Image: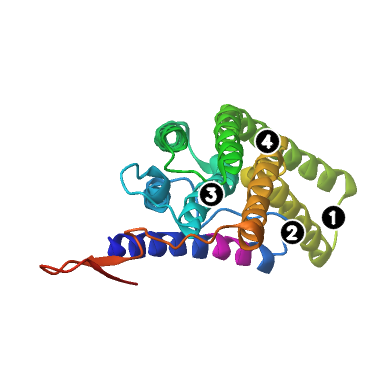
Amino acid sequence: MPWIGRYIVAASLICILAVLANAVQGIRRRKLWLPCRFFTLNTASLTLLGVVVKLPLDLNNPMPGEIDQMAKLSSVVFMSTAMANFMPSLALMDNKDIFMDMAVLGILVMTLVVNVCIELGTGVIYSEKVEHIVVMLSLVFLFGIMCFSTLTVPMIKSHLELKYRERCQMIAVEDLVEGEKPVEVELKENLRNFFIMAETGNPQFVMARSVTCSACCAFCCLNGLLLPEVSLRDNLFGAHVKSMSDYRNRHIAFPGFNPVEWQ
């Protein structure tokens, strides 16, 4: 079981590094939004997320320690953060890929919500119940927002293509009206115009500036604030129950002796 825990940590680390790579790319290009290049909605990222949320999906292994309960909550919060980061990547996908990946994501989200609700009902999750409920509701809202956003992707692409053609025609008309210019001036103006068209006509940029993407980021920030609040409350008022999860501990039993446990 400890190897499964290490496997979960490795999958989480890969996802975090991919998100950081997107952030570094956006900062280097001086963008006010995070372009989705390394962490996008695809089969590989969904497989990694399936590993990351293994802890809250496990109904059989009791995790009574405070750290264990916190690990379940952090896995669900990680899922909501990943869904918010997927939003800009929807704009670059075709209809078939969007349908398939959203179907897989929906199955993963619904399974996670149902399993956490079962754990809340059976007492497997006995701590941070309010926080779990808040995160579960936000996951459902996030998935609904993503579903509605996917319906606008074909319209956004067609609208951007139409605007791009209109702008190209306007540039050609302006060149005819203004007459001949020095080569350096004309080249500089054309580069500036086409650069602006390429940046503002990027489907990811349009999706990132949309109201739905802003709502997803708001839910993500709200869920992220729950983790330090829970950690501070547990450190100040918690009972400090020792972690007894099989994902962190190993047990060996000798004949005639009680099991020996070490971490």
Mark 4: amino acid: Thr
Real-space Cα separation, disc 3 to disc 2, in angstroms: 36 Å
Q: Residue furthest right?
A: 178
In contact (CB < 8 Å): disc 3 and disc 4: no
Q: Which residue is mark 1?
A: 180
Magenta segment boundaries in residue numbering: 19-25
Amino acid type shown at disc 3: Ala
Which residue is more in the foreground, 5 or 159?
Answer: 5
Mark 1 and mark 3 lie on one chain; the one further toward the N terminus is 3
Q: Earlier in the sequence, mark 4 or mark 1?
A: 1
Q: Which mark is residue 82?
A: 3
Q: Residues within 10 Å of mark 4 (few under 14, many from 20)?
A: some
Query: Does residue 149 sit above or below 244 in this rendering?
Result: above
- Residue 146 vs residue 182: left or right? left
Secondary structure beneath label 3: helix
Residue 154 — which label? Answer: none
Figure coloring: rainbow
Instruction: Give yes or no for residue 24 being in the magenta stretch.
Output: yes
